[in-house]
Image (cartoon, coloured by chain):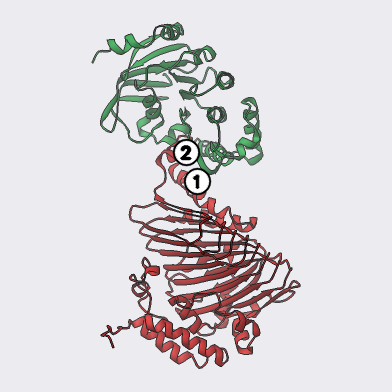
Amino acid sequence: MSLLEIENLHVEIDGKPILKGLDLTVNAGEVHAIMGPNGSGKSTLAYVLAGKADYTPTAGEVRFDGKNIFDMTPDERASAGLFLAFQYPLEIPGVATMTFLRTALNAQRKKRGEAELSTPEFLKKVREVAAKLGIEQEMLRRAVNVGFSGGEKKRNEVLQMALFEPRLAVLDETDSGLDIDALRIVSEGVNRLRSKERAFVVITHYQRLLNYIVPDVVHVLSKGRIVKTGGKELALELEARGYAEYQEEVPA
Amino acid sequence: MNAEVAIIKTAAETALAQAFSQARGRLPGDDAIAKQRAAAFDVFAKAGLPHRRIEDWKYTDLRALMREAKPLAAPPDAAAKARAKTAGALLGDVETRRLVFVDGAFVPELSDVAGLEPGLAVGSLAEALSNGAPTLASHLGKLAPASDAAVALNTALMGDGAVIRIAAGATIERPIHLLFVASDKPAATFTRSLVVVEKGARAMLIESHEGPAGSDYQVNAALEIFVGDEAHVDHVKIIGEGADALHVSTLAAAIGARARFNAFTFTAGGAVVRNQLFLKFDGEDTVAGIRGATLIKGRQHADTTLVADHVARGCQSREMFKTVLDGEAHGVFQGRIIVRPHAQKTDAKMMTRALLLSERAEADNKPELEIFADDVQCGHGATAGALDDDLKFYLMARGIPRPEAEALLIRAFVGEAIEGIEHAGLREALMDAVVAWLEAR
């Protein structure tokens, strides 16, 4: 059984079809890149997997670890091991990052029937993960993402990913707005987590990120469908030739 | 004479008039006080209970909300006093000097009146009125606006309260806690307290109001605080009345020069609550933080009405009021900042935000600026809305179930106001009260 199975997925936002018959299968241990032009449905795919309201599936199936994800609330999906690194991480004034991380981690553990972490256990874990990502303790004391730079917000997403240890991580344009140093730190954070049990879906507009996070499979998403699938060389091809040919040849 | 419309008295107004005529002979105080009471009752009698056509009471129509006037509370019996021993639990382990009032009457045996810090004097208003204490003549009624109906009734019927004086330069470490407890007898209490903090003194005052659910008792409490030059005073009021109570309270303060003054009101209890603050910045270069958090649900009605009057130059005031409304609750905030002609360099900013957890809840916000000086920085902001769906989704996408995600956001919302309280223990106690409210939601 594959970790993620998407069959003929159709999704609408406010009655407007965005995904129009998307198929995707991701096995544990694999890194899939999804590339495509703006408006092709990349972020919609990310949000619908995470369970955002107003992203309405109208046909098709999505199974995560064999279970229909549309039967699960966003928090249930997260606890089951699905993680979305947001393209635009939200600022939450008044909620300290540490409180947020601890509440989230313990909620997931509780849902999975695991013991909640004690304060010292939790602090140790966060410090380890943060240190590897070059995240200062001071940043963790601030409110979630408030006053963070774009790069800090993305690093904070990767910090959460490392802390929650998901089975499937969907990275929605995690490279956007990152300078080259931040890109390297974020990519190293992802690469450290690569394992036989874990899979990644890396959504990106540019090939650059894939120099650091080398994918097993590359898909081209256009007009709501996967129109081409290949190896990592496909990304280089796209970088050289652009998306134009895929935008034109999609059948209606 | 013009053909004035005869005022038709409501049952409550008639009952109040009867209560006053019956009680005036035995209410404490000398002739001068008796005259003050009579004059105040006249003010009330002329206008009656305030209603929605009185601008300051537009959203809290007391004439409609107060169907009847309860009889004046009798002195508490032993059982009522015994029950009052468990009062004040909300404060948790915050160490305070308690002055306990049961049904409006001071109860010395429940109060910490021994071992007063140097510079601290405490007593009961009833006693001070009976003894003709000189502080009363010079201070009582000097700050609370006589024309306000609630204040007028309070002045006419005041029975007891606290009289506190803090000598110049004294620092009173232990917060002084005025603890007002209603017994299960549905009666009316009119308490009046007076606090004089002299030059350079430092004190923290907690005022809490609580009582049993299921009793439609009525509370009218007024507190006048004189804050001397260079004094530092914190006032925290906790309105935790029983679910069926009607609570009207007034804080009137005059703040001297180069002082620090912080006022906070936490409102979670009561069926109908009107919380009035009349603050006058009398001296230069004072810094003040006026904040509040209100959490109401069901059919609760809570009104905060604030007047911050900048008379002297160079004062800074920050006003922040947060209201969380669930069910069919009705929240009201009226805030008026006045900057008088001489109050140049005033820096006053008022922010009020309402968080609506239900589509049937209602929040009315009325911020006003009246500026008569030209070199000032003043502003206000008001928002009302539901919890942000995107924030909720972000938290849920991290594994936090919806109720917990909402609780986290609501705590953050009111936490921004509670953060302004300087006393760490009290901040924690109030955050615990917020959590308790959320869990009972």
Closer to the N terminus: mark 2 or mark 1?
2
Q: Nearer the viewer, residue B217 or B313?
A: B313
Identify the hue of chain A.
green
Q: Is residue B71 left or right of residue B85?
A: left
Tell me which chain appears red. Answer: B
The image quadrant where one finds the N terminus of chain A is top left
Q: Residue at x 60, y 38 (%)?
A: A117
User: Left of B235 or right of it: where is B13?
Assistant: left
Q: Position of residue A81 (x, y in %)?
A: 48, 29
CA–CA distance in space, label 2 to label 1: 9 Å
Q: Is residue B406 visible?
A: yes
Question: Which of these two is toward me, A99 or B150?
Answer: B150
Q: Which residue is mark 1?
A: B408
Q: Locate residue B43, reporting x and y percent.
A: 43, 82
Identify which amino acid the numbered label 2 is placed on.
Answer: Leu
The image quadrant that residue B368 belongs to is: bottom left
Q: Which mark is residue B247?
A: none
How many labels sit on residues? Answer: 2
Judged from the image, the secondary structure of the residue bearing numbered disc 2 is: helix
Asked if badge 2 and badge 1 are on a common chain, one would say yes
Circles 2, 1 touching at the beta carbon (< 8 Å): yes
Residue under label 2: B395
Q: Which residue appears at 28% of the width and 88% of the height?
A: B1
